[in-house]
Amino acid sequence: MLAAREEAIIQSVNRLLAEKGFDAMTVDEVASAVGIAKASLYKHFPSKEDLAAAAMVRVMRRAQQFLQDIEAGLSVCDKLKAVVRWTLQVQLAGQMPALPSQNSSLRVALLGNPDYLAALTAISGVLGAWIEAGQRDGTLDPRLPAVGLLYTLYARACDPVVDFLRAGGQHSDEQIIDLVLSTCFDGLCAR
């Protein structure tokens, strides 16, 4: 029962973070969404930051599984496009926590969470190896710093253009994904 309750809490946190973001989400909303008292919630997670970290760990584990399942024979660009496509699908499904990059208390909680750090390190290692391989074989621009490419891929997980296009109502989710993939991998200039 404890595990089921924690699962319900994390799902609610994930949904609220995706809808509202970290700053606007309250612990009271999480407790209400799960149907438990705020005091009971604090028995599972001692702070709002710990709630957000648990949601991030969940998404990171899903990402690790996705990376493991990618077909090994794909080209580097196809692997990276698959990762960005998956990330955008998760974001459009409301399952990607919207976390502020500059919130110091949340940053401290994430950097103090060994599960989060392990997942981040593993994901960065896989993506970094793909990026370096792509730069060696010429499919990715070797003039660009590998870490810049890595962070560009990570930025797609919180790309505001997705919400802007969705709010405009002129594009389907698949069209939004294709547009972001095109601008990310093909650039803006006509060739």
Image (cartoon, grey):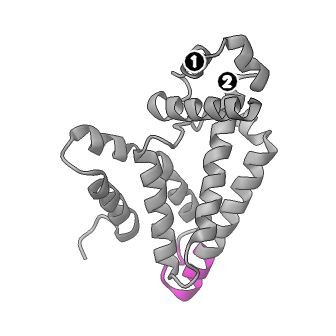
Segment colored magenta: 131-143
Return the residue at label 2.
Answer: 48
The residue at 56%/57% (across/down) is 151
Q: Secondary structure at mark 1?
A: loop
Q: Quadrant of the C terminus?
A: bottom left
Q: Could you say which quadrant of the image residue 6 lies in?
A: top right
Q: Earlier in the sequence, mark 1 or mark 2?
A: 1
Whole-percent x and y of residue 11? Answer: 58, 35
How many residues crowd around disc 2 within 10 Å: few (fewer than 14), some, or many (20 or more)? many
Q: Is residue 30 left or right of residue 139?
A: right
Q: Amino acid at mark 1?
A: Thr
Residue 105 visible in the shown view? no
Vertical comparison of 117 with 72: above or below: above
How many residues crowd around disc 1 within 10 Å: few (fewer than 14), some, or many (20 or more)? some
Q: Secondary structure at mark 2?
A: helix
Do the numbered discs 1 and 2 sit on residues whose CB atoms are within 8 Å? yes
Residue 69 among those drawn in magenta: no
Q: Nearer the viewer, residue 89 or 189?
A: 89
Q: Nearer the viewer, residue 136 or 127?
A: 127
